[in-house]
Structure formats: structure tokens, C-alpha cells
Image (cartoon, coloured by chain):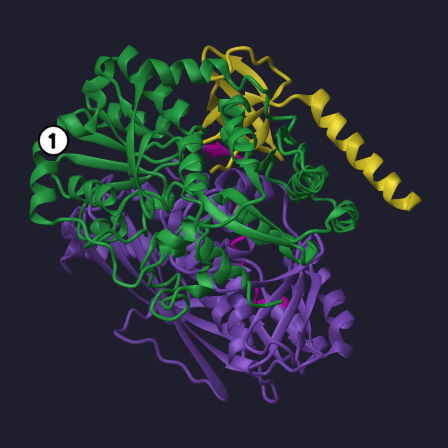
Chain colours: A green, B yellow, C purple
Amino acid sequence: MKFIDEYQNSELAKKLAQRIAGHSVRSIRLMEFCGGHTHAIMRYGIRQLLPETIEMKSGPGCPVCVTAIGDLDKAIALAHSPKVIITTFGDMMRVPGSYSSLQQAKAEGANIRVVYSTMDALEMAKASPNKSVIFIGIGFETTAPTIAASIVKAEKERIGNFYVLSFLKLTPPVMKALLGLGEIKLDGIIGPGHVCVITGSHPYGFIPEKYGVAYVISGFEPLDILLSVDKLVQQIETGSPKVEIAYRRGVKPEGNRKALELMQQVFEIDGADWRGIGIVPQSGLKINKEYQHFDANNAFSGLLRSARNDKPAKEPKGCRCGDVVRGAATPLECKLFGKACTPEKPIGPCMVSSEGACAAYYQYGASYE
Amino acid sequence: MCLAVPVKVVSIEGDEAETEIGGVRRRVSVALTPEVKAGDYVLLHTGYAIGVVDEVEAKETLKLFEEIIKLSEVH
Amino acid sequence: MNDTILLAHGSGGKLSHDLVERKFLPLLANPLLDKLDDSAIFEANGRLAFTTDSYVVNPIFFPGGDIGRLAVCGTVNDLSMNGAKPLYLSLSVIIEEGLLMADLEHIVRSIKAAADEAQVNIITGDTKIVNRGQADKLFITTSGIGIIPAGIDISGANAKAGDRVILSGTIGDHGIAIMSQREGLRFETLLESDCAPLNKLVAQIVEACPNTHCLRDPTRGGLATTLNEFAKQSNVGIAVEEDKIPVKKEVKAACELLGLDPIYVANEGKLVAIVEPGDANKVLTQMKQNCYGRDAAIIGEVTNEHTGRVIMKTRLGPSRIIDMLSGELLPRIC
């Protein structure tokens, strides 16, 4: 497969790893912001190729892991409403809310369908005109324009029974919040390559400028990740942190203008509740006034209010997902990891999501080394 | 965060395109990449092309890898 | 006859008899079935293997097969994996009212074709009709009886350190073929399910190597789950290499699109064999001579280390643990 296979070459990987080891003198800490990077790093065993001087931490870039438990409860509450079809990405199905999960709700009779694309949700809305089709909108800037496009299309085709429950979040504000918290000292960040296809590199200038942290935007194949680590090490060793694009075949500095325009057309920026971090100002996307008839928060406000009152959100006891997504703890440091919390009976989202740090550690065995 | 896969654009009809990867075909939306042409590769995320793959840059990256190898062999 | 199945077809009266006599019997005909007694009577000497499985696949028609073929092959294969020669099958169907008669006929023909290929007879059966909404078009349960030849002892607990792990062909074909038909996933591929009866392949393997240690077909949960089952049952470690595992390019591509790993995707016409190192090449050669084993490959070996665990050397070089599948295989976007 073109643009995939060439970036999985094991000989090149070895050589890149040697080069990194050659440059890396100081002990440094890098954060792979994006859950997709956590997944790829674990899947290919990349940590084993890196020298001991480099410590890797997972970040909050997993939209499933950072969806606030109260927000998930909202989706589950709507699911039980008759005449509602919930459409969601597969990633969300097994995440435990305060009292239930989408998967459990489905078993109890809720009409919940896993989709791969908002296009499928739109088709379902057209096919079932007497039902309300609500799309659970999780994701970052990679996904936001696709949801915006679906809302614009729904408007154009007058699909009146399509709604979006937006939990969309933005990456620069949460990076700022994390760096500002200063819980852990970071020397460099592996930047989310596909988010940056949309946003470009400009929004991240503050990371080296204000915090002195190196920032390299990375693709997701193993050679992409190794190349990015190499560039980060170089920046850090020479004391010259900056924003650099390693994923040049995908990311332009100005990003995808059309996608950004669509996002502006449909959304407005608002505060968002990040699990494990709390409310981060200006870090979420809310459907704006012009398209508010697609906002499930409006259309179902009564239902959502009473659900919130009857069943207030509560975090599972002992769960340290919040600490894990901030990089403040590794999964192994959570007392529940591997005992009360396993992929079969997960307690927190980090164990469910295929890119949650806990799931990655459990499945790929960080302890096996 | 996200899964986006490079697929080849076979044909375009309005704001949708027929794409192909490894013998598998998929209809995708190109609403976010109006500049795309048949023969281009796009990054596919949840049924939408989010960007056109820059083949020139891709070649440059592979050349960079080759240079890195050559340098390491010298040492 | 009517175009669709009605509740009345299940009531035991004339319509029921008509259904069995016109739709099932003529196609499945054999002396034991044709007697139509309450039980089929036969003699069998030796160690018997007995298995049962239900088939609820959705959609019931998919590229490369249908629920009928699956129901025969699945049970034939379960018998074969213990080294048994399959003899007889029972066939139990639960039909949702409203199923098209033409669809039922098609499925019964598939059952017949698969049974013929496997050289087994269906000797007893049952048909029930349920209200709309109480069965997803059609559910099938097949039970099977087979005879294990003397001296054959194949079990998941027999793997020993040093043994070689052989895979009969490409993985992920069935699961991806099914997913390509599912609403919401929408991709087109020429890929077909690999659904096939493996009893003849097994017979060839066992003839070449009567001392075969383990056999299993990696169905739900995929290759990774089967390897883990062996590791735990035999209390050994298993080490495989990603590069050696055959995967069709369409399966690789579909897995990329859906964010899936082929080692967790279901197969319905493949097997994993564990044999002593001295037997490996002989068994491999035999497998390749069978159409269902032509892509067979040695993918790894059994060890004394990391007992109970399966390790895979990734195509990149480093190794990682591969666990059983947890939960459902769901496509991901992240």
C-alpha cells in the first residue's frame, strides 16, 4: 500500500534508532500527545528501539479518554429515548459512564448503531424520517470538519431529523493547560499529524516560544515516529526548540483552509470539560446559532436536564485515568490496572479505547521487556 | 486521533469520490478537499478526505531516510 | 407453495410437512434422513467425537458463502480439529416468519453442497418458525458426530517446547468479507469469505503426521485468540513472526481503513497446526497440496519461555505480546 509500506521498513527503522541513540545524550522526556501515536508505538514495539535516555509519556490526545463522564451519561440518557437512533463511532461503545455504557444500553433495547462516518448517520436519518438520528460527535480537529460538513449537507438536503451531540475538542488549549500545570517536565512533544493536516503548524508556536518545549508534527507509521523522535532529540540537544513538520507529505503550515472554513461556519468555540483535567476554557466546539437546530443539546434539552438531575455524574472510585491522560501517572501506577480494571471489565476509558494508554499497556505488555 | 489512511482517488462525482487502496474500494466525501483530482492520493478519515497527499514531499522524506542511512554507514 | 415462510409452516400440520418434504428432503436426501423417524439410527465403533454449534451470522448471504455453508463447515471443522472423521450432522433451523422461500431454498442448496464436499450426511433435523422480530431471518444449529481413528490424540494441551506452529493460509478473509456487507461500513472488495470444510486437509495432515499435537480453526477472535488458547491449555509460550503470517492485500487494506488488526479477525476455512520440529516440513508440503492449504506457512514455534503468553515479532523488528481479543471487534476512528 503506497504511502504506508515504505514507512514500515525494518532496516531503516534500525538505522534510525541507531542514529537517535547516537545523538541522545541527556535524559529527556517526550510526550506523544495523540492516542493514535500511543497505539502505533505499542503496536510496533517502538519503545524497545529507543535508547534509555528517552522516556515516553502518553498524553490526552485520545478523544474517548477525555470525554467527561457526565457527557457520556448524556449520550446514554438520549439512547433510551424511544424514537431516537444513536449513531456513534465504535470507539465509544464500551466506555463505562457513571451508571451504564452505550453497549449496555444497546443490550437493554436502546437503538444504537456503530457507524464509520457521519455520512452513514445522514443516510440513516433519511431512511428513518420518523426517528431522530443523533450523532455522538467525539474527536479533535481531524474529525470536527467532517462533522461540520455533515451538518452543512443536512441543511442543504433539508434533513430535519439529524442531530449532533458535540463533544469536539481543540488541541492547542489543552496543550497550553497541561504545560501550564507543569505537573511533569516535558522536553518535547510528538505532535498529532492528522490534527495538523487540518490546523497546520501555526497554532502551536507558543509551545517552544513560551514553554521552551520542542514540537515535531509526526505521521503515524513507525518510520514517521522514529524520524520525529530524531528531530526532537536534535532540537533538545542543541537547545533550539521550535515547531517542525516531520509529516511533510500530509501537513502544510497553513493547514486545510476549506476544512477550517467549514468549522468556522458551523461551530463556535466554548469551554469544554476534559476528563482528568476539568474545564479548559475555549477548548471545545459548540454548534453555533445558525445551525442550532442540529444541536442535540437544544432539541433534547428537557430530557438531558432531567437525566442530569436524576442521575448525577460520578467518577468510578480509584480510577486514575485522569492522571494517566495528563501523563502524571503510568497505567502501572494505578492500583486497579490489570486487577479490577481489565479490557474485559474496564473501569475507566483508558482501558477501553484502543488508543488509551492502559489498553495499550495491557495489550502490548509494557512489562514484557 | 486519528486514523487517516492514504487512498487513491479513482474518479470524482460532485463532492464524492471513488477511491481505492489495496484492491478495496470506498466511496468518500471530498467536501474538505475541493482541489483534489483523479489520480491524487488523499488521507481518508471517517469517510472524508481531509487532505491531499503531497507526493513530492513524500519522495523527499524517503530521500531523507536514504541520506540518514548513508550517513550512519559512514560512521 | 407460498413465496414466504409463514408461522403456519411451523405448526406441525400440513404446511409443516410440505415445507420439510418439498424444501429440505429432496435436496438433502439420504437413506437415514429419508426414514423420517423421530431419531436417526446408526452404528459406530470407536472413539466418538460429538460437537454442536449455532450460527446466527448477519448478513445471511455474504461474498463466498452463506449461513448454510457456514453451518456445515463450522461443525465439520470442529470435529476435524480433534482428528475425527466427520460422519453425520443434525440440522436445526429457526426461521423468522417472512423469510423468502427462495432464500431458504438457496440456503438448503448451500448446505447440501457443503455436506457433499465434506462427504457427510445430514440425518436428522428440526424446523421451527417464530414471529417476526424473534429471529434475525434465520438461525441454524448443527451438531456433528465423528470417529477418531485409533492412536490419534490431538488436543490443545499437547503443545511442547520446540514444536512448530503452522498456519494453513491467509487470515482475516471471512471477517472482512462479512464487514464489507454491513451497513455503516460501506466498502467494496472482491474478497470472499474463506468458509470451507477442512476435514480432508486434516486427514492429509494426520496421515503424513499421526503425531500431530494440536489443531484448531481460528474462528471468532482470530489467530491471536487461538494461539493464546493453545499457550494457556498447554502451559507453554508461543512465539510467532508477523512477517510470516500470510495476509491478503485486500484484508490488509480493509484493516487499515477500519483500524483493525488482521490477527483478531475471524476465519472460517483456516487452521493452526502444532507439530514436532522434525514433522514440520512434511506437514507443510502436504498442506500445500490441498486447495485449502496452498498458502500454508510456518509462522512460529512453541517455547518454554513466557508460558501462557504469545509473543509476536513485529514487522518492524521488536516483539510485543499479543493477547486474546477482548470484547467485540469494533472499527475505530482514532
Instruction: Give the percent coordinates (x, y) of residue A86.
Output: 24, 37
Instruction: Give the percent coordinates (x, y) of residue A354.
Output: 45, 50
Q: From this viewpoint, is residue C334 visible? A: no
What amino acid type is highlighted by mark number 1? Ser
- Disc 1: host chain: A
Which of the 4 image quadrants contains residue C202? bottom right
Residue drawn at 70 percent across, 56 percent down: A51
Nearer to me, C188 or A252: A252
Q: What span is in magenta?
A: C187-201
Give the side of residue C95 with respect to residue B17, left or right. left
Nearer to me, C133 or C248: C248
Determine if the magenta segment contains residue C188: yes
Instruction: Give the percent coordinates (x, y) of residue A297.
Output: 18, 29
**Secondary structure beneath disc 1?**
helix
Above or below residue C77? Residue A203 is above
Pointer 1: what residue?
A301
